[in-house]
């Protein structure tokens, strides 16, 4: 039988440490108790789906990443994801500006 709680706990700890967060900091970001974070990391806590979602949001990862589910799509670091969002916002601004320029009345 797979120790799912142990695997999720180990992945949570790995992601938290990679972001240089303490259990207390992660708990505050997720709106949880630091004691519960410790229990989950040790494989003793049994988080709900809502709690897992809050933890993934607090860590800036998808739920699949938190659960350690492999996907076929390439993974982006938080910095890369931020750069992609910035580039998309710039493109949207350019499209909006070009659309607005086309609506101006001709003299």
Image (tube, rainbow, N blue to C red):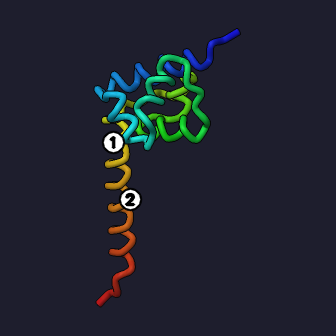
- Residue 24, by quadrant, is top left
Q: Position of residue 42 (x, y in %)?
A: 49, 17
The image position of residue 41, as x and y in percent, is 47, 21
Task: Give me the residue at 38% from left, 50% from top.
Answer: 88
Q: Residues within 10 Å of mark 1 (few under 14, many from 20)?
A: few
The residue tagged 2 is: 92
Foreground mark, 2 or 1, reads 1
The image's mark for residue 82 is: 1
Taking 10 as reference, is 84 left or right?
left
Task: Out of 12 and 24, give the one closest to the viewer.
Answer: 24
Q: Position of residue 11 (x, y in %)?
A: 48, 20
Tell me residue 76's x, y (percent): 40, 31
Q: In the visual, does 48 lie left or right of 90?
A: right
Q: Residue furthest right?
A: 1
Q: Nearer the viewer, residue 80 or 58?
A: 58
**Residue at horizontal 44 percent and vertical 24 percent from the top:** 38
Label 2 neighbour load within 10 Å: few <14, some 14-19, many 20+: few
Viewer-closest of 36 and 52:
36
| Quadrant of the frame with the N terminus | top right
Tag 1's secondary structure?
Answer: helix
Asked which quadrant contains residue 13, the reply is top left
Hey, which residue is sitting farthest front in the picture? 35
């Amino acid at each position: 039988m797979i120790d799912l709680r142990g695997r999720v706990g180990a992945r949570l700890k790995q992601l938290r440490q990679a972001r240089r967060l303490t259990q207390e900091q992660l708990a505050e970001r997720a709106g949880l108790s630091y004691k519960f974070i410790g229990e989950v990391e040790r494989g003793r806590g049994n988080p709900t789906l809502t709690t897992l979602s809050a933890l993934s949001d607090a860590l800036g990862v998808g739920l699949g990443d938190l659960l350690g589910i492999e996907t076929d799509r390439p993974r982006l670091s938080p910095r890369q994801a931020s750069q992609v969002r910035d580039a998309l916002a710039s493109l949207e601004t350019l499209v909006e500006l070009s659309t607005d320029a086309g609506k101006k009345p001709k003299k």
